[in-house]
Image (spheres, coloured by chain):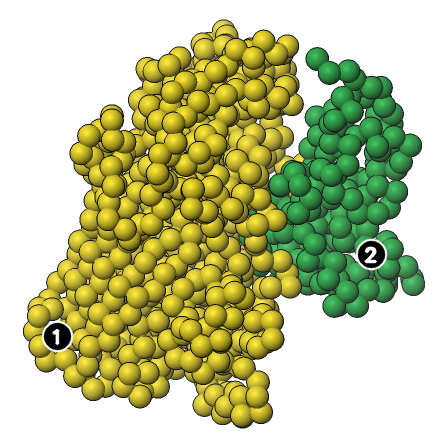
Chain colours: A yellow, B green
Amino acid sequence: MSFVGRSLRRIEDRPLLMGQGAFAADCNWPGQLHMRVVRSPVAFGRILGVETEEATALEGVVAIWTIAELDDLPPIDFRQMGLERLAPYRQFVLARDYVRYVGEPVAVVVAVDPYIAEDAADLVFCDIEELEPQLDATAEPVAFMPDVHPGLMSEPAVIRRGYGDLDAAFACARRVVELEVKIGRHTGVPMETRGGLCVYDTEKDTLRLYGAAKVPHYNRDAISRMLGLAPGRLELSEGHVGGGFGIRGELYPEDVLVCAAALRLKRPVKWIEDRREHLLAANHSRDQVYRLKAAVDSRGFILGLKADFFTDQGAYVRTHGTTVTDLSAGLLPGPYVIPAYDVAGHIRLTNKTPAGTYRAPGRYESTFARERLIDAIAIELGLSPVEVRRVNLIGEAAMPFDRGFETLGTRVVYDSGKYADLLERVLAHLDYDRLQQQLTERRSRGELVGLGLGYFVEKSGLGPQDLVRMRLDMRGDIEIVTGVASVGQGVETALAQICAETLQVPIERIRVIHGQTDRIEIGFGAFASRVTVMAGSAVKIAAEALRATALEVAARLLQTTPQALRLSNGMIETVNGSASLPLGDVAAHLEETGGLTGEGRFASSHMTYPYGIHAAQVRVDPATCAVTIERYVVAYDVGRAVNPMLIEGQIVGGVAQGVGGAFLEEFVYDENGQPLAASFADYLMPTCHEVPEVEVLLREDAPSPLNPLGVKGAGEGGINAAGAALAGAIDAAIQKPGAVAQLPITPGRLHAILRGGR
Amino acid sequence: MPDKRDVTLAVNGKTYAVSIEPRRSLADVLRDDCGLTGTHLGCEHGVCGACTVLVNDKPVRSCLMFGVQAEGKVVRTVEGLADGDTLHPLQQAFWENHGLQCGFCTPGFLMLAAGALQENPDMSDDDIKDVLSSNLCRCTGYQNIVKAVRLAAREMRARTRA
């Protein structure tokens, strides 16, 4: 029976449906204390003092610390893409000398009750000399911390990439098309806020942090380094995780503080953030401005592309280092040939919440910019936007396609793809010409309706490796131990299906252990759509090893050869059906010699590159400037679909977030750097009314040659081109080509466009 | 420490005698004093609906109600939805139709839908969507949640007729 490729319901759902989940806030320990963070009320200023006396006097308060008491803790280091020159811009766990954004941790209160901790935190007074905040990433850089780091400016790095002869491209261009676009500041905002419970074991003198997510092994090592803990003294444990989206599970000041508090007080300490804190303190993302200049020939073929862009990194450089800017620069060319390219990505610090990755980091942004450019080229040359895309797409024969530079430390080589084929499939699905005719007719009757397209290349399956250990017990149940993590995307089911495919065991009999640092020595976590590619491949290898052992042992027991045996429904049977025995019996036979086990390690130095297209049809209400999405199509080639239902879930969920970023979500600041979107009343996320029904064309036309399953990660294609396609659709609907140059497209901005501005 | 009050709560058919500060939200009382952590807190100001429970059969944001206000009322949480090991039709439909991913918002959606369907078993598809638009989900894009509730409503109507 086949397990891979089937839309099986998830093995992880039952406890979640019954209210028996184990999210961070659900973890409790007898005698636990509660931590509350005191946060900066101003965007930029010099700390003159932090007054804690009144708070300390409150009954039930156990400790209040500022950086003075935690002076031995180093700043939080980079997990990815660190550069030496970025080091001075790292964030300490509590503000030191300066505060650089509203919400920055200044002090920490530990008390016997969370309400008391919050009361006490309100009594802590931060005496801060306010300074002029920097709020525009495109403005001239300013001093980062004038007194502490004289001369250190707010542009920590410029990421440059390029190839080809750009001068020659512009010299022979038929036309030069220029464009400036902006993507708003928004982020992942999982429904579960961050949190953790750190338990100190007095007997063993060890710590255990519950509520871990995303990269538990990395975070264990990083926290251990910061606190000076020897290996083995800190373990991290992941329970249920209420959404990841890139931001959750990165190492934040609060994660270190809760461990430091447990270690110092030798008591369990729990920290759960509230939503306001989350919106002020967890990573922001996006917020880029692109300036593009393309040299094109008469067919709209891009001969050369010059790009400058600015990433508003916020107040500090956090764990992601240069990741977002690096990925933006690396994937801006997308699915197009572009023979000459030169890009400069400016990382700029401002006095806003620090930024990191959010689902399709650097791609939601760069796809918006690139696809706006393609639309602009079509307008300038009087060509159809479809035709311009067609002439620029990388051909099938050019695969694997080497872009000629690196991103995330790996060479950008598109491993496989049938880009033109997918475009034709989408056009056929839409019945494109007829649809455009219908829309034209509706517009002639006064309706503001239009269609937009966005083509994109995703990346997934970042290495370096992952390890899986698998054990089949005497009852025939299987336990898979992996170092990856789950952020709610269906990891357990996907890995179980891959295991079941090889071992022919129902997935209900498979248990997947993830995110437990004491169960496996290495693990690289859940990010960059890597789990199915990396851990999935390791599961396949481990299952094949276990299968080989099982067949060999069974052959001896049944007095035949392994070749004469097959697996079916938890049994090993002879091909002719004459004899059989349960897999659990084989395990029992091996019990004294270590049991029936398999190990798989999968390493990869290259990423895989899934690709897809978004098509959006919208209607604009000229009176209210409300936008209705009438139709939404996502075509996505993931190489091979392990569970189509889960992949469609990823795509539809991604579209919803993409719609949020396109129309609703924006961290707005006033001129003093005060955040104006610090609650769900102001930071608007889509409800089921704003999210359209999504038609998913899930394709498996170009399997990845880089892993034994042929899979490519499916987590980020649903969001990638949403801003691009919706912007194109609105342009078409209001018949103002190139009008949408900024996301989110709020009613106010659309009103300004309709009234005659851009 | 602030004064506490002794309160008796009726939750999922059980009685809980708790001693709580008047300022404690019903959500915190359910989670911390009754140990019913299936009710989740997503925003604590009544927008996201993750903390939705039924109070006297009506969906209520338990973050916006004080625990002491629930005295004398009948509270139902997600833990009281299934019949032993047998899932409620809503839970079953969420499972079959992939109506959850991370599962954090799920208890709130289940209780919201359970309350709405209890009040009006014959909700139209549009009515269902209107009701469900009062809660937030960040993973699923809602498509499968809406589908699951529509199918569960149909199933529940069929059972009532049978």
Image: A623 above or below A280: below
Residue A436 shows up from this direction: yes
Labels 2 and 1 touching (C-beta < 8 A): no
Q: Is residue A9 above or below residue A731?
A: above
Where is residue A330? Give x, y as percent: 25, 57
Please give the chain letter of the residue carrying mark 2: B
Q: Which residue is mark 1?
A: A170
Side (left or right) of A391 relative to A261: left
Q: Secondary structure at mark 1?
A: helix
Q: Residue A163, image x and y in percent?
A: 12, 63
Which residue appears at 58% of the width and 92% of the height? Answer: A445
Q: Quadrant of residue B158?
A: bottom right
Badge 2 marks a residue whose secondary structure is: helix
Kindly identify the residue that appears in the image at 56 percent across and 71 percent down. A625
Residue linked to disc 2: B117
Type of the residue with mark 2: Leu
- Residue A184 image position (x, y, % from top left): 42, 56
Parent chain of label 1: A
CA–CA distance in space, label 2 to label 1: 64 Å
Q: Counting other residues with Cα less than 10 Å from the Cα at mark 1, is it few (<14), some (14-19), or many (20 or more)?
A: many
Q: Which mark is residue A681?
A: none
Q: Which residue is nearer to you in this view: B120 or B97?
A: B120
Q: Amino acid at mark 1?
A: Phe
Give coordinates of residue A594: x percent, y percent: 43, 27
Quadrant the C terminus of chain A occupies: bottom left
Q: Nearer the viewer, residue A653 or A292?
A: A292
